[in-house]
Image (cartoon, coloured by chain):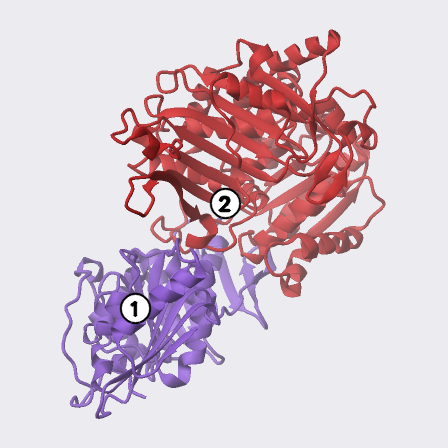
């Protein structure tokens, strides 16, 4: 571990190279660079999740913590670790003070692994516009999490307005196990679908995306019910006289019911943040299925046809009336 | 109508098999406990088993469902690759059944047949069943007859699919393998028969195809113009353990060379398949297998050895002939090395050296492709003295990955070129634990994907290569010959080194 106080980007690059030499050939197989944008108070959670994901997808981990953009003097503190508490790979944790926080890319760009894909993950309220954050502009894939916004559905609409191919949201990742259960429950059902229903907590982003996906795939209007509890509770699909439903049970199981067949219990664990992140890192191409679900959930269209490239838009959270949470200040 | 919720672009959703029953014959055996049951658990844990899945054990034990469940639980806890969770097991346990019976017991098989029908109602298994024959080959005929008698193997009678999984050995020579194939294919239809060669389930073996056919870098030089020779090695440090009875009858060539090594060779030498479905892969693999010819000069290019006592990994180990239940004058080979050629334009004149053995210094399986020397070296002779031939090595196990060796300048004022190695470790660039071979193959059986399973004709083609070699060795035995001894803990007998020396080559030390 090398800890650098009040340092420069060049010194961080040198420290990383020195750590790599010392560690031998640890990093010959880097698949990608993961940039994590996080608040000071959530650093530990984000580090734990990124470490878990990095165990499955060896990557260079760059954690950026933006602090006090109003501080009079810009300052950079950095910690360089290889094979330490952040897993077997390479990691750099950077704290940027003052105006440097708005120019984080000047430190991060030289640290990206050569020619490997870049994934940026905002662990916090999603940006209003990703183009406001230079750390999102150069990324090949951008991961937000609408469930961390105060108004999840409003955040989801902003994601649709701001969408570019290569964007994804952990609210969508949380639908995967539900979608897998629905698909396998529906495998042996014949005939056109007549109705579908999704029940869960009101204003829940995962419920909205799952309903959007069903609507898009099945071609029927999906009824959305408000139910008590956290997150999704039930999905029900009817095709003619056959109804299949998946209901979250107690613990990590789900009840699968189908007309004319005995009920079954199936695994439906609540996954850790690190596992969700790992799922996102598995594929780095644009997720068209997410784009379609997002369109259906927000009533927008043409998302997949947009350009995958963004141009940076200068945004100063100190002077703005509506500071973008992407440039989080703590 | 296809399921509207399944979308080929939606690659987050796993492929999950149809509801089905997995019937395991010989479920109390080693393989079932160490590999199969843990693989079933791992699949369940990864959410890859269908809602209606039943594991049905069949063996000659006076057990109920509960007895079997507790044995299976212990096996899963010990052998599973993924974390053992009680809740996952609880759900799996609800779907575990056991039927006691011996293979000649008509009543037991009638019960099995009616149980399968019953499960269609209670578990919604829709007539689908896979039968895993984890039993000695001598028991195959009777079990297959029982299945035929009860109509269990009949797709149309069951209303779903019925598949059978067979483990190696697939016979012990060409006639016996043909007999076995006929028997199995008569009871089941040919495309419902899955022959497991667990080597083909390994990620690196599949990566061989990706390496060759997804890249521009390798395929243009993958031919006799640029490749000097290929060495395929499967070495084990263990002896025969408790398999003396089986091994005495089999030997290294039948145990390993006929299946694993020839399959690895086929994947290395085959042409590009039209697509990656099972049928196209089979066509190409068969083509190359039928072009492999046994060596003409068997005395020079088919070497066998047997381990003598020695020291291995700091421990004293006994000779093969001193192992329990091995004849004191046994002539079974524990090491085999052969030189094969592929009679095609691509490979004309390129020898493929295959070797396998027990009690070798370490456990390793690898495919080494050795390239020719550069046609002209614009350096002084002394500058390139330490330059060997370029090599591409695919490590199948352990440390799955690849090494590329090439020459590089030694830093300094003089021009001096020396070999360096560039290493790619599979586990480093991708997920840290790739699925166990059995896990992958079992899932493929339930999904009906046969691309990683050798076809009966591939098996027969392989025997065509091995039979003349076995016959030659048998003749040697008749005239008083025997395998050359090698000390346990060394890389095989001297004859294997002589074989390569004759061609002006040496074995690569893996």
At mark 2, the secondary structure is loop
- Label 2, label 1: how many angstroms apart (C-alpha)? 31 Å
Name the colour assigned to chain A in the rendering.
purple
Q: Residue at x 47, y 41 (%)?
A: B204
Give A20 or A68, whichever is nearer the viewer: A20
Whether residue B194 is visible to the viewer of this picture, yes or no, is yes
Marks 2 and 1: which is nearer the front? 1
Give B405 or B382, whichever is nearer the viewer: B382
Disc 2: which residue: B400
Q: Residue at x 46, y 17 (%)?
A: B341
Q: Is residue A204 above or below residue B103?
A: below
**Number of the label disc, if any, that sits on residue A13:** 1
Q: Residue at x 72, y 38 (%)?
A: B311
Q: Position of residue A135 (x, y in %)?
A: 25, 71
Q: Quadrant of residue A100?
A: bottom left
Q: Is residue B386 above or below residue A130?
A: above
Give A288 or B170, whichever is nearer the viewer: B170
Q: Position of residue B130 (x, y in %)?
A: 61, 39
**Number of the label disc, if any, that sits on residue A168:** none
| Left or right of A41 on screen, residue B320 | right
Which quadrant, please, contains the N terminus of chain A?
bottom left
The answer to the question of whether label 2 and label 1 lie on touching residues, with beta carbons closer than 8 A, is no
At mark 1, the secondary structure is helix
Chain identifier of the red chain: B
Q: Quadrant of residue A153?
A: bottom left
Whether residue A275 is visible to the viewer of this picture, yes or no, is no
Mark 1 — on which chain does it sit? A
Neighbour tally class for label 2: few under 14, some 14-19, many 20 plus, Cα within 10 Å: some
């Amino acid at each position: 571990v090398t800890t650098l106080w009040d340092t420069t980007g060049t010194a961080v690059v040198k420290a990383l190279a020195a750590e790599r030499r010392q560690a031998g050939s640890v990093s010959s197989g880097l698949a990608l660079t993961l940039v994590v944008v996080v608040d000071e108070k959530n650093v530990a959670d984000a580090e734990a999740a990124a470490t878990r994901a990095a165990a499955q997808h060896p990557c260079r981990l760059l954690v950026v913590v933006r602090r006090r953009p109003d501080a009079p003097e810009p300052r950079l503190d950095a910690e360089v670790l290889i094979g330490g508490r952040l897993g077997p790979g390479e990691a750099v944790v950077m704290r940027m003070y003052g105006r440097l926080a708005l120019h984080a890319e000047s430190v991060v760009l030289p640290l990206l692994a050569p020619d490997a894909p870049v994934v940026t993950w905002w662990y916090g309220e999603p940006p209003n516009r990703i183009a406001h954050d230079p750390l999102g502009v150069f990324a090949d894939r951008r991961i937000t999490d609408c469930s961390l916004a105060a108004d999840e559905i409003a955040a989801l609409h902003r994601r649709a307005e701001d969408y570019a191919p290569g964007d994804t949201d952990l609210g969508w990742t949380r639908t995967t196990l539900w979608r897998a259960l629905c698909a396998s429950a529906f495998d042996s059902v014949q005939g056109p679908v007549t109705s579908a229903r999704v029940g869960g907590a009101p204003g829940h982003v995962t419920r909205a995306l799952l309903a959007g996906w069903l609507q898009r795939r099945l071609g029927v209007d999906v009824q959305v019910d408000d139910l008590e509890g956290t997150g999704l509770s039930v999905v029900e699909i009817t095709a003619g006289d056959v109804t299949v439903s998946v209901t979250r049970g107690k613990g990590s199981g789900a009840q699968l019911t189908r007309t004319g067949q005995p009920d079954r219990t199936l695994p439906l664990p609540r996954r850790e943040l690190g596992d969700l992140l790992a799922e996102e890192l598995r594929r780095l191409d644009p997720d068209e299925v997410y784009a379609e679900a997002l369109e259906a959930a927000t009533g927008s269209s043409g998302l997949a046809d947009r350009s995958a490239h963004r141009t940076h838009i200068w945004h100063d959270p100190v002077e703005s009336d509506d500071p973008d949470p992407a440039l989080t200040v703590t | 109508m296809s399921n509207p919720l399944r979308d080929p672009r939606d690659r987050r959703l796993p492929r999950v098999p149809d509801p089905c029953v997995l019937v395991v014959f010989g479920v109390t055996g080693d393989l079932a406990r160490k590999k199969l049951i843990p693989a079933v658990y791992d699949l369940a844990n990864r959410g890859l088993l269908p809602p209606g899945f039943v594991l049905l054990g069949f063996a000659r034990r006076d057990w109920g469902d509960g007895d079997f469940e507790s044995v299976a639980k212990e096996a899963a806890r010990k052998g599973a690759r993924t974390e053992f969770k009680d809740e996952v097991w609880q759900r799996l346990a609800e779907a575990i059944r056991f039927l006691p019976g011996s293979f000649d017991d008509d009543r037991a098989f009638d019960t099995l047949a009616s149980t399968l029908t019953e499960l269609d109602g209670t578990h919604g298994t829709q007539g689908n069943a896979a039968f895993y024959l984890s039993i000695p080959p001598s028991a195959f005929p009777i079990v297959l007859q029982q299945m035929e008698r009860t109509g269990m193997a009949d797709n149309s009678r069951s209303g779903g699919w019925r598949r059978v999984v067979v483990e190696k050995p697939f016979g012990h020579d060409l006639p016996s393998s043909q007999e076995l194939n006929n028997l199995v294919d008569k009871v089941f239809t040919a495309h419902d028969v899955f022959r497991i060669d667990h080597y083909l389930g390994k990620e690196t073996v599949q990566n061989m195809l990706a390496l060759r056919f997804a890249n521009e870098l390798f395929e243009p030089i993958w031919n006799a113009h640029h490749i000097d020779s290929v060495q395929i090695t499967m070495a084990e440090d263990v002896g025969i353990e408790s398999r003396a009875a089986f091994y005495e009858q089999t030997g290294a060539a039948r145990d390993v060379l006929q299946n694993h090594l020839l399959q690895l060779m086929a994947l290395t030498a085959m042409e590009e398949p039209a697509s990656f479905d099972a049928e196209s892969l089979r066509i190409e693999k068969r083509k190359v297998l039928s072009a492999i010819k046994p060596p003409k000069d068997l005395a020079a290019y088919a070497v066998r050895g047997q381990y003598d006592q020695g020291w291995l990994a700091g421990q004293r180990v006994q000779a093969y002939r001193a192992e329990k239940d091995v004849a004191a004058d046994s002539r079974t080979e524990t090491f085999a090395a052969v030189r094969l050629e592929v009679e095609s334009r691509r490979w004309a004149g390129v020898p493929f050296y295959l070797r396998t053995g027990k009690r070798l210094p370490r456990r390793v399986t690898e495919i080494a492709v050795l390239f020719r020397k550069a046609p002209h070296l614009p350096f002084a002779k002394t500058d390139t003295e330490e330059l060997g031939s370029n090599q591409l090595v695919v490590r199948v196990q352990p440390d799955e990955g690849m090494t590329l060796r090439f020459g590089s300048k030694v830093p300094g004022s003089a021009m001096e070129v020396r070999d360096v190695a560039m290493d790619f470790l599979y586990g480093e660039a991708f997920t840290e634990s790739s699925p166990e071979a059995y896990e992958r193959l079992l899932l493929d059986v339930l999904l009906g994907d046969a691309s990683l399973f050798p076809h009966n004709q591939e098996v027969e083609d392989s025997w065509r290569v091995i039979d003349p070699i076995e016959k030659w060795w048998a003749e040697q035995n008749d005239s008083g010959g025997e395998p050359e001894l090698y000390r346990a803990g060394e890389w095989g007998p001297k004859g294997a080194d002589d074989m390569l020396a004759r061609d002006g080559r040496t074995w690569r030390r893996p």
